[in-house]
Amino acid sequence: MDADSIAVERSIPESATIHVENVGGIDRTEVRLERGITVLSGRNATNRTSLLTAIMAALGSDVDNVKADATSAAAVLEFGDETYRRTLTRKNGTVVADGEPYLDDAEVADLFAFLLESNELRRAVARGAELRELLMRPVDTDEIRAEIDRRIEQKDRIDERLDEPAELETRLPALESERDRLTGDVEDLRSELDAAEAALEESDRDAGEARAEQPELEATLEELQSTRTELDRVSDRIETERESIEALTDERETVEATIRSFGDGEEPDRDRLEAEIDELQAERDSLETEIGRLQNAITFNERLLEDPGAFLTADEGDGGSPTDELLADSTTVACWTCGSSVPQTQIETTIEQLRSVRTDRLDRRAEIDAKLDDRRRTLAEIEDRRSEYRDAKRRREQLEDELSRRRERLDELTGDRDALTAAIRELEEAVETIERDVQATVLDRHRKVNELEFELERTAQEREDVDERIADIEDRLAERERLETRREELSERLAELRTRIDRIETEAVAAFNEHMANILELLDYGNLDRIWLDRTARSDGTGRGGRTESRFELKIVRRTDDGAAYEDSIDHLSESEREVTGLVFTLAGYLVHDVHETVPFVLLDSLEAIDADRIAALVEYFDSHVPYVVVALLREDAATLEAPHEIVTEI
């Protein structure tokens, strides 16, 4: 995608203005950047890198380049109708950033857009380091794999629930048939009861006097009916308690299995992890302080190169000024520690040494950050497992208590049932005794009515239970469509997750190889025929069944004078070839990760190893893919880019 199409999509302004105060060697300046290429032209130590650092700060990068004689610095970016501010304040040897920059998180921009000499990707290519991890850093592969595991578990649970409706479908016809049978039984019983009540009424008229003389029969029959109803209620409760005990026992077994899965409940040494985290954090804080001091020293020496006179005091006596004498020879500088005259190259060498040490400290800080993330993640996992283990034990205790209460209640209900059964036998015996004194027909019809009423009530309740079970099954079957839709969504998400990492890696390699081929054709490095990335797979042997990881290997092919091709090593690349390869690698990452959607700027410096014509071709190639390219060049290199691009010579 070229810069014009990007501008249409994102409505990128045609220009930007950066206001800088006390950054690096800059006292105060204002520079206008036009969309396209802006060249910062000048010799070394003319604040070009300081201006790039200020732009990085306004965009959101963590920089600590406060002017040596100042306690605070500021960078303000006016971009369209918006203004973005960043302040840097030195406190107790540490630079603290504040304000509202263009980006909330500049990690991706630091990798793929801010391509100064210290850029991590450029340095990795230059020293032949592993490139895959850096190129894939914006992609949280661990989180993608964790999400894959979560989605698989969700899909498995849905599959189990989808299997259950299939089983329920086979049970539904039998239940519906049972309901029809019970409905017929209820209707038959009601007809029988109506007939029995009519017969009893007729018998009552015939035996009214006998019944009047035996009121205890009615009372005994009512008590018998009441007792039978109570027995039925108690029997239902016994069955309910047994079902509850069975369900609680199953749950307890599940909880027991969960507890056993934790072993003895012991976890790795948590105190050791916390102590290690504290030690790593302390070392990181120390490195932060040291990095700040190194940066101050670098900035101070850069200012010494830019304006040596600022550090000397004029002699008020007769004769010429000592400062004038020191500055008479532009190749020497007065040492700021002892005042002696030293070659300018010696100061520049000192600056390079300081930069090298600072780079080492930055690498160590990155290692410590990785270890801190790993230890903190492990500690969080330990806390999660301890919480799950405690929850399981607490649930087991609750289940034990509930089971105990339920069993006690079952024993009580069983005792009640036995007592009711015995009471019914006694009442039936009492009825039989009374029957001897009452007309046999009346008694038989009373018994028949009572039995039919009891049977009708029991059958109606049984039919109601079947109705509820059918309704429950129908509700659960109705949920199938929603579950199937959710399962399809999970399957699509899993497919996307499983291919995302592979797709990004494939696109990154393809983008690098395409742009590298284009650049080599533009720059014409003689016998350098081809440079490309080869993506290979390897197993790390971890996780469930191990995981396959990719590795990016840089391949180089040259040609002899007679046209024969041979494979070469990155160690044999010239400094110019290394720099070009590193920059093309960062451009591939910029495009693959769509960095242009959030950062329309690419900043470049330290291109001196590349000759002027190739710098011009390389920068213009970047311009065809990036809205704003800001590049710091020596005057002789900038001459090849003067028209029609914006040239800034005063900062």
Image (spheres, rainbow, N blue to C red):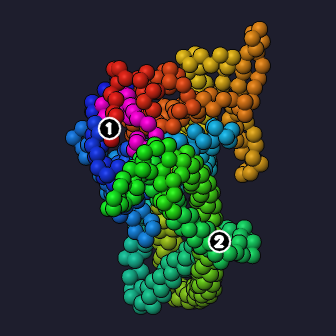
Choose between 178 and 90: the one closer to the eye: 90
Which residue is labeled 2 in the image?
276
Choose between 585 and 310: the one closer to the eye: 310
Residue 208 x/y as whole percent = 38, 82
How many numbered marks appear?
2
CA distance separating discs 1 and 2: 50 Å
Q: Amino acid at mark 1?
A: Glu
- Element under label 1? loop
Q: Amino acid at mark 2?
A: Glu
Figure check: 399 above or below 423: above
Choose between 296 and 603: the one closer to the eye: 296
Residue 650, numbered circle: 1
Q: Quadrant of the N terminus?
A: top left
Residue 226 x/y as whole percent = 47, 82
Q: Which residues are magenta?
A: 33-48
The residue at the point 48 percent across, 86 percent down is 223
- Residue 377 appearing in the image: no
**On the rendered structure, is 377 left or right of 339?**
right
Q: Are marks 1 and 2 in contact (CB under 8 Å)?
A: no
Residue 328, numbered circle: none
Answer whether residue 34 is magenta in the image: yes
The residue at the point 45 percent across, 56 percent down is 300
Figure check: 16 above or below 282: above
Choose between 556 and 251: the one closer to the eye: 556
Answer whether residue 486 is magenta in the image: no
Residue extending farthest top? 562
Residue 26 x/y as whole percent = 35, 49
Q: Quadrant of the C terminus?
A: top left
Residue 317 x/y as whole percent = 33, 62
